[in-house]
Amino acid sequence: MMSRFDLHGRKAVVTGGAQGIGAGIVRGLAEAGATVTIVDRQSDKARALAEASGPGLVVVTADIGSAEGCRQAISQARDAMGGLDILVNNAAPARNREMIGRIADVDWADHESIVLHAAAAIAESALDDLVASGHGAIVNVSSILATSIGADQSSLAYHVSKAGLNQFTRWLAVRCGASGVRVNAVAPGLVDRDVGHKLTANPVNKKIVDSVVPLRRAGTARDIADAVIFLASDAAAYVTGQVLTIDGGLGINEVFGASLRAYTAAGER
């Protein structure tokens, strides 16, 4: 009997899928059996990922910073795969540390255009296909910073755009429910990169993470991908309008006690 988590025969689009969490989601969906289109400006990285991940991956090089770019990306994905069942809105602008702490003079345009406007335009462009599939699913990639504040980690625009993405998820779930299209989001916490510098490669960071995260580790791209697979699959057939937090329990820890343990573990006293 086929598992309800099985995605064989499903066709998925992942925006910003060339690296990081997006790449982990691409690999996870492909391993679950889906045909996947990577939509990204970084064509070389996207093609390398597609080649390394086996058959069934398509690359669409696109700038989704405009409504027309979004329409073209979905059109190319539809033509390449012959339809669409799953949409993962993962794309987000690179974090600009110069914007951290600013109030008015901040990177609003970048986050509005990619996190909010593109997610809406991509969803609208894909909606007819998702309805026609009979089991359409949208998963938006949010962040724990949509509901908590990391003032020294990300800009104000990042926080606000991810909060907006959560509300967009709920609004779209109500809008699309009667059409049979489910809309959910995942909100990652502390995540170690698969490639490049890892948060917990720093020994002090590792001690802090082990102290404040109940599961005693940072998350991985695969942890996020597995949640996306669940929300995209028939196993979540009665789940819509939800933001699934994937943080190893970080958000339920009492702040003072967790901070005190982390301070002590890091050897600061």
Image: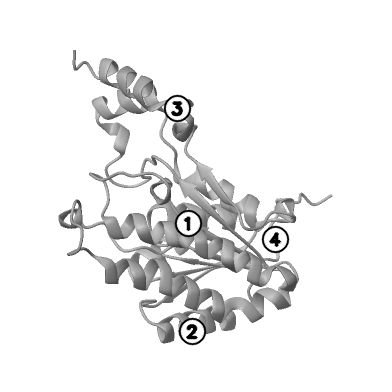
Q: Which residue is mark 4?
A: 8
Q: Amino acid at mark 4?
A: His
What is the x, y in percent for residue 42? 33, 69
Residue drawn at 58 percent across, 84 percent down: 79
Mark 3 or mark 1, which is nearer to you? Answer: 3
Q: CA distance from mark 4 to mark 2?
A: 26 Å
Instruction: Tell me which numbered mark, 1 or 4, is placed earlier along the sequence.
Output: 4
- Mark with earlier residue (3, 1): 1
Q: Which mark is residue 141?
A: 1
Using the numbered discs, state the Cα–Cα distance from disc 1 to disc 4 in whole angstroms. Answer: 22 Å
Task: Please tell me which of labels 4 and 3 falls first in the chain.
Answer: 4
Mark 2 and mark 3 lie on one chain; the one further toward the N terminus is: 2
Badge number at residue 71:
2
Mark 2: which amino acid?
Arg
Location of residue 43 by image quarter: bottom left
- Gap between marks 2 and 1 measured at Cα: 20 Å
Q: Nearer the viewer, mark 4 or mark 3?
A: 3
